[in-house]
Amino acid sequence: MLLNKSFKLHVMVGLLLSVGIIGLALFESRRDSYAIPAFARKYQTSCATCHNNYPELNDFGEAFKKNGFKFPKDDETFVKEPPVLLGAAAQKQAFPNTIYPGEIPGTIPIGFRYSGFATINSRQPVALGFLPRTDLFTPNTFTILAAGSMGSNLSFWIDDDISTGGSGADGGLGDGYIKYNDLGHFLRLPKDALNVRFGQFELDLPFSQARTINPTDYDIYDQASVAMQQGTTNNPFVFAAPQRGIEFGGYPNDGNFAWSVSFVNGSNDQPAMRNSKDVYFRVSQKFNLDRDRNSRKEIQAAGATGPRDHTSIRVGAFYYYGRNALNLDGTLLPGFGILREPFYRAGGDFRFKYNKFELYGLGMFGHDTNLFADPNALTLLHAAPVTFTGGFVQANYWIYPWMIAIMRYDAVNSPTDFLNGVSLHNTRNRFSPGLQFLIRANLKAVFEYEHRWQIPFGLPGQSFRPNSFTGGIGYSF
């Protein structure tokens, strides 16, 4: 075995333990509700300004984020907590003979987000050990959030999981970066055609995992390439994890075309494990389908009556390339040098919005070069590559502005996982219908049922389907 012996156990536990919640809350009418803290306090506005179902951004929220966490138009007229100016405006003309003036938020831009849940699991075979059918409450994450602008072009974001799973031991930094907007101004490029951010951040994914509305991850984002008995490949990279590096990107004139190129360590949110760096590309184009030509140019916000997004379709493509390095200290395969195994991920995505309905999805192909070591001859042979395909499709419908029905389908096809006993077939899939309630604009109850794939156990032909019901509460303040 060329892989850590605990991997099989981790895979089994991951398949069996589903995250979930049952949240009970009392509804009462109240008109004033405030959004995710830092920006809601700064502008004295509701979460619904930027979110149809937080933390997912609507069209206005996307424009707000693109503009460096500022209102797309006439920002200064909407600010209710003016920033503290770090220098006089006249210093701009005196630069570089003085420090360029900036600003910091007028109040400390800190907020918190919390979620917790309970679980109902399918009855597990005794051969797999005891797993309670129900768990009335499991604390999930308690996160501190800080974000804002430091002038006309600089913005920052920090989120740190103070506690994960009810324990502080697993908490850690999520995203922590600084971003400079409109760097291309100095090259006479269109507004925001070139921006740069540096730090630890979620890749420019078609759909965010860190800020998803779903209580469970997208399965394809969590897919890692591990050969186990089939070769040497043991690649820790997964799309779900934040990466450390630098990103260049842009959306000319805050328009519908967007691009990004990132250079990252490729070791998720852990220290760099190799000298080589990975590169990630993404492009997307959004087509506004509103019939009224004038309304296409306006940035719409959600309100008391629900979503006000443009009718639109967005299509995109992405590509990730890296070279995984193994046997760096020579202990994994004594007598062999460093093993470098190139890998890539490629895929496409779409998102369609119409009135109270949205449909989106993603497809991805993964390929890792795989080697097989002959310890007697001290030679390396090319084994069958570790490959996988998969993706997800999700539909959301706003029954009311505060009630959203969800249907999601995830699938991963991995012949290597099947050969290593992770699943009963090459393809593993699940259906996840759900219902979410915005009790307040910053308080929600989430319910989701997972009909999952079969996993083998015991004698040949025996299998178990770890279905579960999850639901719970989450809030920001």
Image (spheres, grey):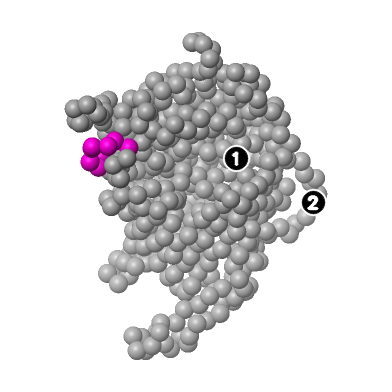
Report x, y in % for residue 57: 54, 51
User: Which quadrant of the figure has residue 152?
Assistant: bottom left
Q: Which residue is mark 1?
A: 215
For badge 1, the amino acid type reads Pro
If the image is split into quadrants, where does the N terminus sit?
top left
**Residue sitting at x 28%, y 42%:** 330
User: What secondary structure prevails in the magenta region?
Assistant: loop
Q: For residue 40: magenta?
A: no
User: Which quadrant of the figure has residue 317?
Assistant: top left
Local SS, label 2: loop
Q: Which residue is mark 2?
A: 29
Q: Is residue 89 above or below residue 366?
A: below
User: Which quadrant of the figure has residue 322?
Assistant: top left
Q: Is residue 150 left or right of residue 476?
A: left
For the image, the number of numbered tags is 2
Q: Is residue 285 visible?
A: no
Q: Is residue 409 left or right of residue 215?
A: left
**Residue sitting at x 34%, y 89%:** 97
Q: Residues within 10 Å of mark 1 (few under 14, many from 20)?
A: many
Asked if the residue under mark 2 is in contact with the one under mark 1, i.e. CB atoms within 8 Å, the reply is no
Magenta-highlighted residues? 332-342
**Residue sitting at x 39%, y 61%:** 198
If the image is split into quadrants, where does the C terminus sit?
bottom right
Report x, y in % for residue 102: 47, 78
Q: Is residue 260 above or below residue 157?
A: above
Local SS, label 1: loop
For badge 2, the amino acid type reads Ser
Q: Nearer the viewer, residue 391 or 298?
A: 391
Q: Mark 1 to mark 2: distance in Å?
A: 26 Å
